[in-house]
Amino acid sequence: MKGFLQHSLLTSIGVDHGFGTVASSPRPHCLVLRQVHGTQVLSSGECRDRGLSFEGDGLVSVATSDEVGVFTADCLPVLAATESGRVVGAFHAGWRGAAARIVPEGIYRMAHEGQTLPTAFRVVLGPAIGPCCLTVGAEVWEAVASKNPTYSQRQRRTLDLWELVTHQLLEAGVPAENIGRISLCTRCHADLFFSHRGWGARRNGRSMLNYIRPWRDDRGEPR
Ligand SMILES: [Zn+2]
């Protein structure tokens, strides 16, 4: 877990997870898709079948020991688990994916596969470019408004990814007390995180891995 940030909503149910920093150690067994800022969510089984070159921006792991993750460098990483820790998911939401509702898409997939309701989910929004640094134009707001008619934000020169995705999660039925945040702006804290905007060419393709894996007991059995 070296160099990863964690949140008590997930540690308190024993779910191993982490939001990457520049100091994170590699996790070679973590499954990650080729991310394209879309809304495709796959299960870890499908990911294994199709190969890791398959495109998608969310992965769920259902009653397996598969660790799943997403890479980010300013985009919002979202990690979710059911209360039992049997079903987990990792989602990648930049402004395009967030506007197109990748996160509720992933939550519905987890609910369906795990035969459980979103009311039993715990969801944590990780470090991402904050509203302090995410200046946007009218085309971004059109994309947000067209798929999220009930979302509004006091000022429209910037976009708050944490607020937009929280709004979507509440609509999907996740209780407010089960939604957590590590609201550190990746650009303002470019010493801690690889930031697309903060690092520019110096980033050289480097990103942060954000991972989660289903709960297992000492013998490797699910709950
Ligand atoms: Zn900032």
Image: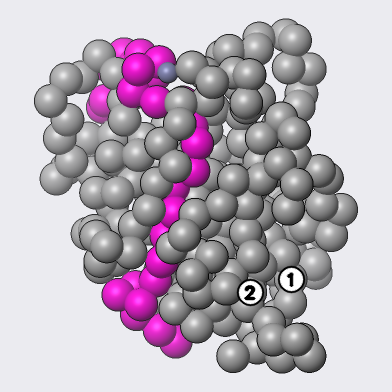
User: Given contact means CB atoms under 8 Å apart, are the residues at marks 2 and 1 in contact?
Assistant: yes
Against 214, residue 148 (above or below) is above
Residue type at mark 2? Pro
Question: Any mark on residue 36, and which?
Answer: none
Against 86, residue 21 (above or below) is above
Q: Which residue is mark 1?
A: 66
Q: Is residue 105 left or right of residue 212?
A: left
Residue 188: x, y in percent?
Answer: 49, 17
Against 25, residue 16 (above or below) is below
Give the Cα distance between marks 2 and 1.
Answer: 7 Å
Residue placed furthest toward the right: 28
| Helix, strand or loop status at disc 2 | loop
Mark 1, ligand 1, within 8 Å: the answer is no
Residue 222: x, y in percent?
Answer: 65, 88
Mark 2, ligand 1, within 8 Å: the answer is no
Is residue 93 among the parts visible in the rendering? no
Q: Which residue is mark 2?
A: 214
- Ligand 1 quadrant assignment: top left
Residue type at mark 1? Asp
